[in-house]
Amino acid sequence: MLAVDVQNLSIQYGKLEAVKGITLQIPRGEVFGFIGPNGAGKSSTIRVLATLQPDYHGFAKVMGFNIRSKPHLVREQIGYVPDFFGVYEDLTAREYLHFFAAAYRLPIAKRKSVVDDVLQLTDLTGKIDSQVDSLSRGMKQRLSLARVLLHDPAVLLLDEPASGLDPRARIEMRELLKALKEMGKTILISSHILHELAQLCTTIGIIEAGRMVAQGSIAEIYQRLGVLKIVHVQVARQTPELIAKLRAVEGVTSVDDQADRISIRFEEGRLEVEDLHDIIHAEGARIRMFQPEVMDMETAFMKLTEGQTA
Amino acid sequence: MQFLQLFSLPLLTKELIEQAQNKRTYILRTLYAAALYVPALLQYHNLNGGGSASGVVNFGQGRNLFLILTLTQAWMILLLLPPITCGALTVEKEKDTLALLLLTKLSPWTIIFEKFLSRIFAMGTYQLLSLPLFAIVYGIGGVELGELIFAIVALISLTMVVGSLSILTSSWFRTTSVAFVMTYLLLLILGSGVVPLTYGIVISLRMRNFPPAPVVTFWDAITDMMMQPQVMSLLGLVILPMLLSIACLFLASKVLIMRAFVPAHNIVLEMFRFADRFFNELNKATTGGIILVPDRISLPHFDPIAWRETQKKSLGTFRYQFRILMLLLAPLILAISAVLTESRTDFTSPFRIFPAFFWVVSVICLTIHATGAIPSERIRQTLDVLLVCPIAPAEIVREKLAGVRRLIMILTVPFAILVLFQAIWSGYVIQGATTWQSANFWLELTTISLATVIYMPVIMWTGFQMGLRMRTQIQAVLSTFAFIGAACALPVILIVSWDNLDLNQNPSLNQAQEPWLIFLMRWLNPLQVLFGTGNLSRGVDPITNTFYVMNPRFAWFVIGVHFAIYGALWWWLRRNAMQSFSRIVRRLEPNPDSMD
């Protein structure tokens, strides 16, 4: 069963169409990274799933419950961390967590142990009696995560949880999310920190101007973007004949003879990187450098998007 | 705007563009025009000949219209200018944009002056609306040109003083709501003490007569001065306010940087904490620190929102609510003691002031508490987090108002003590009372009891609804006060308008001869019910000039209808708040029509 099932979702704010027919399916236990520029429609989509956006068209289900007909059941299944802290600063960490434990109707007898568990998981046990307003940003964000874990939800909706955190807090947050992934939680996370998503997510969706421009596993997206691959080569005895032979290889689309290297573009389906290496070697060239262009999430993001907003 | 840019007033330009784009500017302008033109035209209609006769008969009749116009404008300045000016700098602080402004080449004085000018210009555009009316007044006659100029100068001076005071508080305080309250406090001090005293000194100097002539109120001073357009008064009305305005603006510019980054304080909470320290010290000094009822901090078990509202909010905790109760009870207990020790037979007169005092405190406390229920969640950005919890909307609303409900219970205590004391004491002294006194007494007791039980929840739900719908708490507080003011003032205005239109051909002291519509409007007014119930059951014997019981059943019926209407309003406000909560906060609720 799908944990999240969104079909043809559209959201309109007045004349502005923020989300234009998004479809996404997240199986249970997956970590789905939602990437897109500011104003692309990420937060709006997450708010629909969090039952906080009544005006939408399309169809959305969480853990099999239709959001429009059974939002009260959806709320039992989700843990929502908005893109702001959302903490009561006049409470201590203990009071804050007990407040939400009562709000989620946890049995009184279980509350203390649950609160202790989530505090341990989020490494906040030492801060249990600290006023929330005395906590650092990273601690407040971890406290928000502790809050959403109280009722053991199946799906976590995290709207830019690492936003505004310092490098240490980001690393701690990433480690915490990895732990949640291992616990089998389905996580939908939006972020601008793309390389962190790459380390964490099993699938990603790239959204721009309200439309999903790419969706799938990270490898699938790289493959799709890498239809034309580039390999940078340096050889000891470079000759014009070598360049001509490389241009004649099936699948090679261009060979750029630069001052310090040869840049070879080829179609990945017709020629493998390893075969290209063998062909150069077979021509008697002594290879000093053989470097396929590394595509990271930033490159993928830049290739897929044009910086547009809805 | 290009013209202003020539003089390099970028902040003023920006402010004026923003005002021009803001819908509120036009709404206020329309309200201002309505407040001026409706009473003025009614007064004009009521001139000799009912406005339809030849204009000749109206010559020299403009004085009343002139007074109405001037005083209405003075009130409008006092009511409108602080709300539009107090946010001038506090909004910049709240949005963290003041630092950016201070980093520019604009000096603090320029920032203050341009902000001040932008508000004065806005108020000036409102005041320009009165020019055609002043022209009519002058055309009708009865007012000299000097008086007309004098009135206009007085209004400009008032605008300057109110505007500069508002800018000063805006520069000093962190939040708009505190600046707003402090502006009115300063105006009250100025109006009730400083201006009359200064005027008295000016008059005394002129008359060479010490000590200063007593002047009762600010309005007496203004009216008196308007009637005596002397050079000295003109100087007093122009030079002193201008000096005061310049001083306020200068002070505002001096404190702008110093107070730019002060953290937000909960002034109510700080006041209560100060009182805590004081009482703790007092307790240590007197009893050695014995605490009869220690504070118990427990964790929430079943109603977490109600727990936070009653245990963690400054106005919601029992300790602070008890302080409010003591504040209300102390003077009442003193008055009761005085009555008991003097063995007075008049058991109502010493307590006349208390219902008004209790009501003022109750309205302020309830409004501030109820309007903050939702805006406080919005400001802390905790509303979304709360809304995704599996709690029904009606439950959220009910729990959010738990602290206010307890405050109502606390506030009813002084009313109950007052009612009970009067009821018990009357048993001893009522034997000598007239039949009217006896009948009226029980009617008044019932009225005050019902008012406590019904009006307070109406205020609570009105405040909550305003807070739910407005962006900020200050808007909600002002709207709630406006609603309460309208409920009290509208019937009066309608009655006055009715009388002015001369439709009531036989005005009489006796309500039995009043048109039923006028009668209904009169008794819809909560103020009339709270403080004029006695008029309902009595008639005046024209020969002996004594009261007699007119129709007690009718009086009970009228009071019953009044409270039935307000009870229905309570029910509707409550039901509407529960039902519309999710829609307004944009939370999805189950829709049985949608397919799974």
Image (cartoon, rainbow, N blue to C red):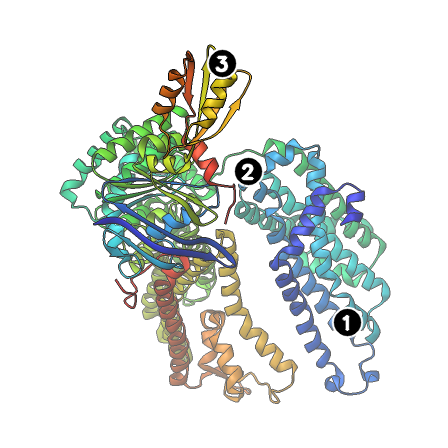
Q: Please check whether the numbered discs 1 and 3 fall on a single chain.
A: no
Q: Residues within 10 Å of mark 2 (few under 14, many from 20)?
A: few
Residue A18 position (above or below residue A192): below
Q: CA distance from mark 2 to mark 3?
A: 62 Å
x and y, in percent, of residue B82 in the image: 62, 52
Mark 2 residue type: Asp
Q: Position of residue B570 (x, y in %)?
A: 38, 68
Residue B72 rendering spot, x and y as whole percentages: 67, 65
What residue lies at 34% left-to-right and 63% top-to-bottom? Answer: B578
Secondary structure beneath label 2: loop
Q: Of tags 1 and 3, which is closer to the observer? A: 3
Q: Chain of mark 3?
A: A
Amino acid type assigned to the residue bearing label 1 in the image: Arg
Rounded to the nearest whole Å, what is the CA distance between mark 1 and mark 3? 106 Å
Q: Quadrant of residue B135?
A: bottom right
Q: Which residue is mark 2?
A: B96
Question: Do badges 2 and 3 share one subunit?
Answer: no
Are there few (<14), some (14-19), or many (20+) residues within 10 Å of tag 3? some
Looking at the image, is mark 2 or mark 1 earlier in the sequence?
Answer: 1
Helix, strand or loop at mark 1? helix
**Subunit under mark 2:** B
The count of marks equals 3
Disc ID at residue A238: 3
Q: Which mark is residue B504?
A: none
Give the labeled residue for mark 1.
B63
Say which element carries label 3.
loop
Task: Locate residue B268: give its quadrant.
Answer: top left
